[in-house]
């Protein structure tokens, strides 16, 4: 039977970002759509024992991006701004395999800015000109800027590289940074350790793919992910083991805040969304100029 299924290679890094992909595989939703999806696991910042391969300054030197560039995977998802950066720069710069934004969704990961109570930081304004640990050009970086620019001037927001999620958590506990940006399961670990969540927000994923992956196949993938998102929302505890595995024994299910797990069906990436997100990212100097909706976005799954 497997021989009749269409093979697709999709990459994943952190469970909270890629849970619909994992669950669609677990529950046979991809197979129901006639797909054999191989999940290519690459290091992210969320595994307890992860290193800095996913945090290199040049995003195209990172493991997932390098594998995509080399043709070792067909499709990936990241935070919306991270996909924007990679899609834009693969389009406006030479030497990289083109990646188009092909959907918005389906995982809405939570990011939180966390402090140590001993720092006596109680509100976002107190982070003025103080170092906040993030990983550059990843969701923690972009979401931190989004969260804080409503409270501080842009020039007052100071982000700094602080390693993996575990390393960040340790750094804020040692007082090496004023705050850190974390995703689940590390927010729950921080809370369990008595650290303070100053503010938090969901961060939408985007989906990216190369031109080689046709619209009909993408549509099948997104239908499977939509089914997975629905299953997760009904019973998040059933799939929380992926997050607990990343924590490597530092967290139990009873201490994981399941309400932070949010997923929804993928949907087309609109021109309005592109313009808003691209101009915001460009305004921070985080992406290259010269991109357009036409050369960056392809909603072929809905055509």
Image: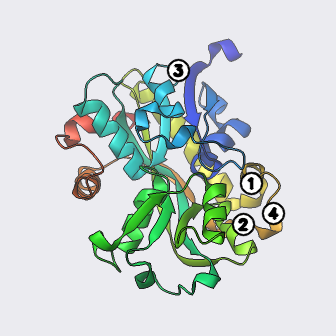
**Mark 2 falls on what kind of element?**
helix
**Mark 3 falls on what kind of element?**
loop
Question: N-terminal of the two: label 2 or label 4?
Answer: 2
> Gap between marks 4 and 3, in whole Å?
34 Å
Question: N-terminal of the two: label 1 or label 2?
Answer: 2
The relative height of residue 67 versus residue 241 in the rendered view (above or below) is above
Determine the residue located farthest toward the left in the rendered image. Answer: 290
Which of these two is toward me, 290 or 219?
290
- How busy is the neighbourhood of tag 1: few (under 14 within 10 Å), some, or many (20 plus)? many
Question: What label does residue 72 carry, if any?
Answer: 3
Residue indicated by mark 2: 189
Question: Which residue is at 53% across, 31% downward?
Answer: 63
Q: Quadrant of the C terminus?
A: top left
Question: N-terminal of the two: label 4 or label 3?
Answer: 3
The relative height of residue 121 versus residue 145 in the rendered view (above or below) is below
Give the mark toward the camera: 2 or 3: 2
**Mark 1 falls on what kind of element?**
helix
Question: N-terminal of the two: label 3 or label 1?
Answer: 3
> Gap between marks 3 and 1, in whole Å?
27 Å
Query: In x, y percent, where is residue 77?
Result: 49, 42
Give the mark toward the camera: 3 or 1: 1
Residue indicated by mark 1: 247
Q: Is residue 252 left or right of residue 226?
A: right
Q: Is residue 72 left or right of residue 258?
A: left
Question: What label does residue 272 carry, if any?
Answer: none
**Mark 4 falls on what kind of element?**
helix
Residue contact between numbered discs 3 and 1, judged by CB atoms under 8 Å:
no
> Gap between marks 2 and 3, in whole Å?
34 Å
Question: Which residue is at 38% across, 38% downward?
Answer: 102
Which of these two is toward me, 83 or 120?
120
> Gap between marks 4 and 1, in whole Å?
11 Å
Residue indicated by mark 4: 253
């Amino acid at each position: 039977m497997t021989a009749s299924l269409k093979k697709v290679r999709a990459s994943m890094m952190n469970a909270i970002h890629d849970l619909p992909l994992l669950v669609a595989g677990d529950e046979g939703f991809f197979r129901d759509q006639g797909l054999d999806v191989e999940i290519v696991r690459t290091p992210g910042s969320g595994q307890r024992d992860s290193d800095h391969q996913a945090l290199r300054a040049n995003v195209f030197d990172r493991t997932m991006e390098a594998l995509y560039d080399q043709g070792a995977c067909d499709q990936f998802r990241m935070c919306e701004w991270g996909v924007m950066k990679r899609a834009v720069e693969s389009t406006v710069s030479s030497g990289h395999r083109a990646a188009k934004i092909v959907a918005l969704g389906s995982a809405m990961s939570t990011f939180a800015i966390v402090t140590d109570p001993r720092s006596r930081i109680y509100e976002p304004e107190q982070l003025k000109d103080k170092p906040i640990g993030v990983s550059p050009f990843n969701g923690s970086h972009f979401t931190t800027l989004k969260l804080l620019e409503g409270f501080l001037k842009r020039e007052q927001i100071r982000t700094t590289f602080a390693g993996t999620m575990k390393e960040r958590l340790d750094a804020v506990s040692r007082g090496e940074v004023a705050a850190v940006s974390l995703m689940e399961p590390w927010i729950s670990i921080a809370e369990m350790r008595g650290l303070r969540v100053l503010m938090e927000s969901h961060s939408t994923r985007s989906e990216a793919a190369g031109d080689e992956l046709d619209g009909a196949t993408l549509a099948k993938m997104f239908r499977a992910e939509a089914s997975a998102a629905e299953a997760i929302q009904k019973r998040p505890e059933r799939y929380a083991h992926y997050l607990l595995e990343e924590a490597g024994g530092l967290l139990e299910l009873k201490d994981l805040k399941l309400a932070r797990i949010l997923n929804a069906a993928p949907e087309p990436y609109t021109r309005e969304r592109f313009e808003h997100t691209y101009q915001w990212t460009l305004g921070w100097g985080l992406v290259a100029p010269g991109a357009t909706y036409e050369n960056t976005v392809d909603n072929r799954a809905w055509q």
